[in-house]
Image: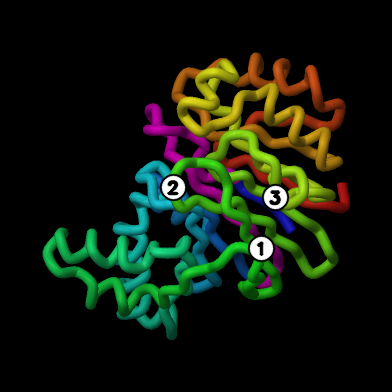
Amino acid sequence: MDLRIIGRSSPYAGPGEAAVGYVVDNEGGHMMLECGTGVVAKYLQRYKLSELQGVIISHLHPDHSADLFPLGFAILHSLQQGLRSRPVHLYLPPGGVDTFNAVLEHLGGLQKHYAQAFAYREYRAHVPISIGNWKAYFHRVYHGMSCHGVMVEGEQGQRLGYTADTKMGPELERFFQGVDLLLCEATVDSEEEAQSTNHLTAEEAGRLGAAIGASHLVLTHFLPGTDVDMKKCLAARHFSGKITAAEIDAVYAVGGE
């Protein structure tokens, strides 16, 4: 299976970029992981909504979820055109369905429109779900709100780990142990800032990648203008495997490299 970077920016996207959004795909279709500001337009340059098998949102901060609003209307249009026959499963963290519907109510009572586009589900920590040919697992991470890291397992046992937004915590190593590729936020520059904002530094990302035995560490979740080469150098102080700074539209194989 492959991971494509749609957007990597936070808390906003710079010119020509998008906030956080990724696609996991194989020959049978694809799923979206996060849907931040600007993601849908870039996603539609590469993918067909008819092949979208599900959307996973780690948490409802706008840089991870704001483009659910245009995505819902795009799916609705696709259904009206006969390009899809059913809504898209939208997987939200615990409490997320009520929160999303409350926002839709304040945006003019749009719940009925979005209920036609999305089939809502709430995932739970340590309870796997099936999306197409994948299994996804979840773990509550340390971001000061309902936010979950994700592990996606492919048909041949390939495993993609995604930290979402988190500071370091005692269960991260256990949950992500043995993943082939770790997609890891590397947002802040000091451990003091990491603790106060509930994010990771690039060095902490490197430590986590080494502790779990990942083959490939992909750093993401950058403020526009970040020196990503420096982020890679900092991570390399602790991680000796392959390190990549996420690049827009890049595709990375998960397992079997």
Identify the image quadrant of residue 96: bottom left
The amino acid beneath tag 2 is: Met
For the N terminus, which image quadrant? bottom right
In this picture, residue 235 sits left or right of residue 242: left
Foreground pick, 95 / 183: 95
Residue with the mark numbered 1:
137
Is residue 29 located in the magenta-colored stretch of the structure?
no
Q: Which residues are magenta?
A: 5-28
Q: Is residue 76 among the parts visible in the rendering?
A: yes
Identity of the residue drawn at 55% across and 49% down = 22
- The residue type indicated by label 1 comes to Tyr
To which residue does mark 2 refer? Answer: 145
Judge from the rendering whether residue 18 lies leftward or rightward of residue 148; answer left or right: left
Tell whether 197 sits left or right of 78.
right
| First along the sequence among labels 3 and 2 | 2
- Horizontal placement of 32 versus 169: left or right? left
| Sequence-first disc among 3 and 1 | 1
Q: CA distance from mark 2 to mark 1?
A: 18 Å
Magenta: predominant secondary structure element? loop
Q: Quadrant of residue 114?
A: bottom left
Which residue is disc 3 drawn over?
161
SS assignment at label 2:
loop
Q: Who's the residue at 68% across and 56% down the image?
A: 151
Q: Find residue 169 and report its horizontal and vertical position in percent.
A: 65, 39
Look at the numbered disc 1 and give the secondary structure of its residue: strand
Q: Where is residue 136 shown, x and y percent of the image? A: 66, 65
